[in-house]
Image: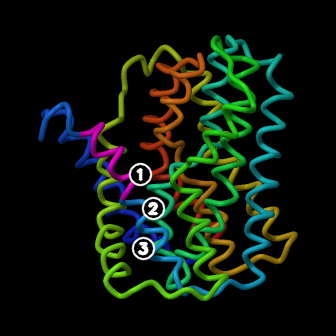
Amino acid sequence: MPSMSPILLAVAPIFGLILIGFLLRRIDFPGPGFWPVSERLTYYALFPALLVSGLSGRPFDESATGLAVTLFVSVCGVAAVLLLLRRLLPMTGPAFTSVFQGAIRPNTYVGMSAAAALLGPDWMTLSAVALLTLVPLVNVLCVLVLSRHGSNGGGLRRTAVELGRNPLILACVAGFMLNGFDIVLPVVLDDLLGIMGKAALPMGLLAVGAGLRLDGAGERVLPVVVASAAHLVALPLAAFGCAVVLGLDGPSRGAALIYTAIPVSVSAFILARQMGGDHRLMALIITVQTLLSAVTLPLVLAFLG
């Protein structure tokens, strides 16, 4: 087992920024309208710039396939177990959708920050493979479950439209195409995207902290425990097992563990509210998982990485 100290030193600034975002929101600084705007700026402009800039000119090897398969199998396995247990869980359909999202949807801001700190020079390539695998898969699974168990429902057409205009997917595809066709970005454009990308992770982490809510923590213990155990324990264990079977090691195994051991994304709250999930429970799951992952993420990486 590697020493915990380097891992703790690497992830401490990540959760430090989340804490700063939480404290800034608590004192209403810089203002109530700032955080929703900053989230949109990060999601639609800064984060895509980071991905396009980081993927341009980076080579890929055969470990990318193993990473994608590991993440795909792990997420589908945990999702299948939850669906099989649905009848045994004493909760409403909308509450189950929030547990389901809480079990499989990753927070890409935390994931990319951890990857940048821990995976070395190939972190961007590995992160792009992870995002291209997880973002479409998780969105399809969550929308299908919300369509079945949520109070508003939805459809596959809506899912396809959302995936087709997802800025993270579009940015990853653009970056891969630049690589595939050996296209070199002009120096000015590459520098511009690089400068924008440097702001993406700190802004995203501050926004995560600003969105944390602890209201009703003592009233919804079972669904919070189920979602958190599935996401922070079962999912990385499944990824570890798949990685061992496929012979995945080094940074690729680290990427598989990081992107399965990070907490649920804040975007799960938006989807829950739009499609009739229990959005208040979703907000609580997001908060509890983010706090717990400050402890569980270093432990997972130290013992399994």
Quadrant showing the C terminus: bottom right
Q: In which image quadrant can residue 151 be found? A: top right
Q: Callout 3: few (<14), some (14-19), or many (20+) C-alpha neighbours within 10 Å?
A: few
The amino acid sitting under disc 2 is Pro
Question: Residue at 56% of width from left, 86% of height from top?
Answer: 183
Q: Which residue is mark 2?
A: 48
* Residue 2 relative to residue 292: left or right: right
The amino acid sitting under disc 3 is Ser
Task: Decide: is 5 above or below 164.
Answer: below
Q: Residue 5 got which mark?
A: 3
Q: Earlier in the sequence, mark 3 or mark 2?
A: 3
Q: CA distance from mark 2 to mark 1?
A: 7 Å
Q: Are marks 2 and 1 in contact (CB under 8 Å)?
A: yes
Magenta part of the chain: 35-45
Q: Are marks 3 and 2 in contact (CB under 8 Å)?
A: no
The amino acid sitting under disc 1 is Tyr
Q: Which residue is mark 1?
A: 44
* Residue 109 relative to residue 58: left or right: left
Please name whichever residue, 257 or 173, is drawn nearer the observer in this view of the structure. 173
Q: Callout 1: few (<14), some (14-19), or many (20+) C-alpha neighbours within 10 Å?
A: some
- The secondary structure type at the circle numbered 2 is helix
Q: CA distance from mark 3 to mark 2?
A: 32 Å
Residue 28 visible somewhere in the drawing: yes
Q: CA distance from mark 1 to mark 3?
A: 35 Å
Task: Decide: is 173 above or below 159.
Answer: below
Task: Decide: is 220 above or below 108.
Answer: above
Q: In which image quadrant can residue 196 be found? A: bottom left
* Residue 9 relative to residue 138: left or right: left
Give the x, y percent position of residue 115.
50, 69
